[in-house]
Image (spheres, helix red, strand yellow):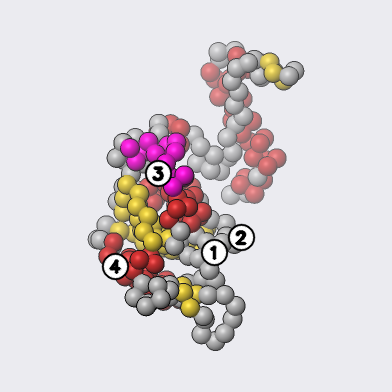
Amino acid sequence: MKIDILSLFPDMFKGVFSESIIKRAIDNKLVEINIHNFRDYTKDPHNKVDDTPYGGGCGMVLTPQPIFDCVEKLKTKDSKVILLTPSGRPYKQKLAYSLSHEKHLIIICGHYEGFDERIRTLADIEISIGDYILTGGEIASMVLVDSITRLIPGVIKEQSHLEDSFNNNFLLDYPTYTKPRVYKGMEVPEVLLSGDHKKIEEYRKNESIKKTKELRPDLLEK
């Protein structure tokens, strides 16, 4: 998969994409990630990419020309263009799976007070990662790239993501334990030491339901 990200702050991505699973995926050529500073595409003599909004109002609005030119240079018949915006489709695991099957993603990160409305015409899909406001789309794009990259075949073991929370009938993960058996008086549940796989599976299912009831009862309503 190829992922192109449009941002005014490309240095924000250096640490995130140079560590852990994403770095290994890049090194193993399972994903290619490129960051494009769309300021490089502006035709404004003062290198501007934003301006004041028509009709008045606070803040600055991203102008269409630099983003249009950048997307049009990158786009191919295999591209899916994503616009990150608070008004977009809520981001869920099912959507992450769908996007992980794409060949090429172009992700547009907003900043300042928002986009010129005409930029929306570039997008195949608009996505929101939650009902809150960030200073820009960079962090949201990192969330997308991380959640999508781990689903690409070969990046992690398939069983690892098949058993994820939000991928198992809307239940949260069951609690897990490792050594030592007792730590500060807290013991590993005896059933996990029994070797009885049927009982372990039943225990984990029950604990998953219990945890979801306590922490995310809204998921059970689905």
Measured Cα–Cα span from mark 2 to mark 3: 24 Å
Q: Residue at x 51, y 71 (%)?
A: 114
> Looking at the picture, how far across and down is residue 46, in whole percent?
41, 76
**SS at mark 2?**
loop
Q: If you read the primary sequence from the N terminus, does the residue marked by circle 2 or circle 3 appear first?
A: 2
Q: Farthest front residue?
A: 46
Q: Residue at x 48, y 78 (%)?
A: 51
Measured Cα–Cα span from mark 3 to mark 4: 24 Å
Q: Residue at x 53, y 68 (%)?
A: 112
Tag on residue 149?
3
Can residue 102 be spotted in the picture?
no
Which amino acid type is shown beneath numbered disc 4? Glu
Q: Is residue 169 left or right of residue 75?
A: right
Residue 177 sits above or below residue 171 on the image: above
Report crowding for label 2: few under 14, some 14 to 19, many 20 or more residues within 10 A (C-alpha). few
Q: Which residues are magenta?
A: 14-27
Q: If you read the primary sequence from the N terminus, does the residue marked by circle 1 or circle 4 appear first?
A: 4
Closer to us: mark 3 or mark 4?
A: 4
Front position in the image: 118 or 36: 36
**SS at mark 3?**
helix
In the picture of the structure, the residue carrying the numbered disc 2 is 132
Q: If you read the primary sequence from the N terminus, does the residue marked by circle 1 or circle 2 appear first?
A: 1
Tag on residue 72?
4
Q: Report if residue 119 lies within the magenta region.
A: no
Q: Farthest left residue?
A: 77
Closer to us: mark 4 or mark 2?
A: 4
Q: Farthest bottom residue?
A: 55
Which amino acid type is shown beneath numbered disc 3? Thr
Measured Cα–Cα span from mark 1 to mark 4: 24 Å
Q: Find residue 106 and report its image quarter.
A: bottom left
Report crowding for label 3: few under 14, some 14 to 19, many 20 or more residues within 10 A (C-alpha). many
